[in-house]
Image (cartoon, rainbow, N blue to C red):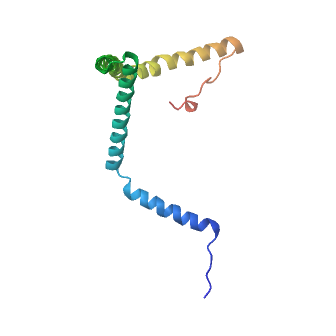
Amino acid sequence: MTHRLAPRGRRADAMSESFGDMLGNYCTPTVGIGLLLTVGLLVGLMALFVLHTLTVWVSGDPEVAFHRARQWVGYTSSVWNSLRTLFNGAKKVAFFWVPDWNTFAKHMIEPAVYIGLDVASQIFTGYAANCTVEPECCHF
């Protein structure tokens, strides 16, 4: 009875496929969301720990450090909420403004560019071009 050895790459491919299959069994949206929440919670707790440690180091008194950290977190949340309010307002304005801009560009700017190119071609060449910009070349 002879043992045949597989070529070098085949065994590694078989192992990676089985690892990929194994990983695919555990990668579900629920696991992904749970992992994101866990990482977010750990990052948040670490940020609070670092903030509290810095304020203890600056003040030397844990009670004063707690109140300073609470104050800094309050300021940070106020800035964050203000920026998010401005961003959401800008997003709503853009949501209603973009279709108007597209209409303006299609019916005002595009014809003005075509007319400008036609006029420039007539002025500099001395004769009218059949079509300076063909509509088929512009797929907007």
Give the residue furthest to the top.
Answer: 123
* Number of disc labels: 0
Q: Residue 22, position in %: x, y?
A: 42, 60
**Who is closer to the viewer here, 108 or 23?**
23
**Who is closer to the viewer here, 39 or 8?**
39
Locate the N terminus by quadrant: bottom right
Which quadrant of the structure image shows residue 137?
Answer: top right
Which quadrant of the structure image shows residue 113?
Answer: top right
Give the residue furthest to the bottom.
Answer: 1
Which quadrant of the structure image shows residue 71?
Answer: top left
**Who is closer to the viewer here, 101 or 64?**
64
Q: Residue 24, position in %: x, y?
A: 41, 57
| Whether residue 97 is visible | no
Give the residue furthest to the right.
Answer: 125
Answer left or right for 9 relative to 108.
right
Q: Residue 66, position in %: x, y?
A: 30, 21
Residue at the spot x=62%, y=23% of the render?
A: 132
Q: Residue 131, position in %: x, y?
A: 61, 24
Answer left or right for 88 relative to 102.
left
Answer left or right for 136 relative to 51.
right
Residue at the spot x=62%, y=85% of the render?
A: 2
| Whether residue 41 is visible | yes
**Who is closer to the viewer here, 5 or 74?**
74
Residue at the spot x=45%, y=19% of the render?
A: 107
Residue at the spot x=28%, y=19% of the render?
A: 63
